[in-house]
Amino acid sequence: MKAGNRGIVRSLIAGLTVMATALASQPAAAQSRERLPIVRDAEIEQLVKEYSGPLLQAAGLSASRVEIILVNDLNFNAFVAGRRIFINTGTILQSETPNETIGVIAHEIGHLAGGHQERLRDQVARAQTIAVVAGLLGAGVAAAGAASGQGGLASAGAGVMTSGGGIAQRGLFAYQRTEEITADRSALTYLRQTGQSPRGLLDSFEGLMRNNLLSGGRTDRYVSSHPAPQDRIGFLQTAARESPYFDRTDPPALQQRHDLARAKIAAYNGGAGLVRQTFGRDLHSLPAQYGDAIATHLSGSPAQALQKIDSLIATNPRNPYFHEVRGEVLMEGGRAEEAAAAFTRAADLDGGNSGILRAAIGQAIVTGGNPARMQDAIRQIRRGLEIDPNNSIAYRFLAMAYGQIGEVGSAELATAEGYWQAGAFRDAKVFAARAQQKFRPGTPQWQQANDIITTN
């Protein structure tokens, strides 16, 4: 290779290193969130919040700065992006005990506390650079071989080009495997500090290993972003049993709440069939009956669903989420005022102060279509949005309420806010621009619309 060519290659490498680093630092979390099937549910969110709170404190992280997002996917999976922990609903459904889900959350918090994602971005940039550089060097050798007529040298260059990406990929995956093991160790520490058993974490990996064996698939452990389950279990089986809390079981009340959440997930994803599959050992249990009531509602039998949920409320009158389901059944049946009353009861009983439940009161009133009730609907929805400003659906009902009373600018601004929270930024800017024209410059509404328009 000539000296001039080496200089060109060095310049290309420098430029590509900058480009790769920039790519690795892009806010992919926000983009991926738009494409994920996110699910909002007051009951499951409150449960997961209670699971994660003590663990975050043990890790020295502020619960107010970490967002846990539920992904409507029945696969067993969880991952971290930015300051968010994404948990598949399938993880909860497949966890027979709260402790199993808690173990998974502890592991993901280990990634957050360890700053693994930030370092992973650096590793991604490095891997991209290695792959590109190896390709450039291979191309340079191949070009030199072709120019000199040395076919062997050209073949060697092709070999470098082929292996460069593999070297980078294996290096990146080796880094990820190390971080996964570190997160396992951190999870064990948090569980011990909070007086919880590490058995659930161990059970989760044992289940994953059994599934891998039953699937008959073979995976090259060097081309894997996680260590092989059997390798992790070998460490966990020893370390977990050293915990003085290994044999501690979940409180019965928490176990029941966990199973109620599993029943809801099963009903919404697989109807009565998945509910029976999940609770086949005891179809008369409270969770099985809860799932059956929800499945009946979703199948289009409101009268029968109402009868079933009322039966559950009769035996458990202080469960806020039974009243929430009752409100949903009534709203679907066109009984808006009764639905609003049911949601009010749910919100009053809810110890978690869920903005979803509070906004649901106003949403039910809006479906009733009575203009005289729209101001109350607006108050309830806005109260819910103060607690939970990420509730994009609530903004749609807020826009409908403003439309009912002829406040078109406020309706368009609420629509813009809803689009913004849903990640549809282009649509948000369109409606914000339309809304801004209907407000006097400098007013809070005008400024709010301007913030949406001008924010990148």
Image (cartoon, rainbow, N blue to C red):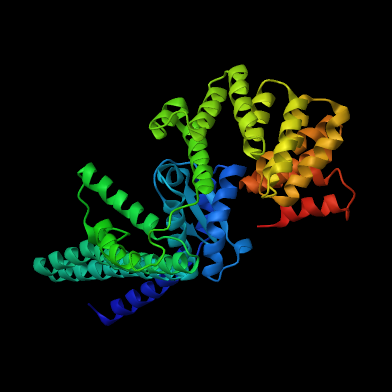
Q: What is the x, y in percent for residue 297?
A: 57, 24
Does residue 374 appear in this view?
yes
Q: Is residue 443 left or right of residue 58?
A: right
Asked if 381 appears above or below 181 in the picture, the reply is above
Residue at left offset 76%, top offset 38%: 398
Q: Is residue 19 visible?
A: no
Q: Is residue 248 above or below residue 305?
A: below
Q: Give how far across and how far down residue 76 sits, in percent.
A: 39, 47
In the rendered structure, the answer to whether residue 86 lies left or right of residue 6 reads: right
Q: Nearer the viewer, residue 36 or 367?
A: 367
The residue furthest bottom is 3
Place of residue 92 in the rendered image (x, y in percent of width and height, measured from the top left): 46, 45
Kindly identify the residue that appears in the image at 39 percent across and 31 percent down: 280
**Which residue is drawn at the image coordinates 26% and 47% (left, top)?**
210
The percent position of residue 204, horizontal first and vertical second, equals: 35, 52
The quarter holding residue 49 reads bottom right
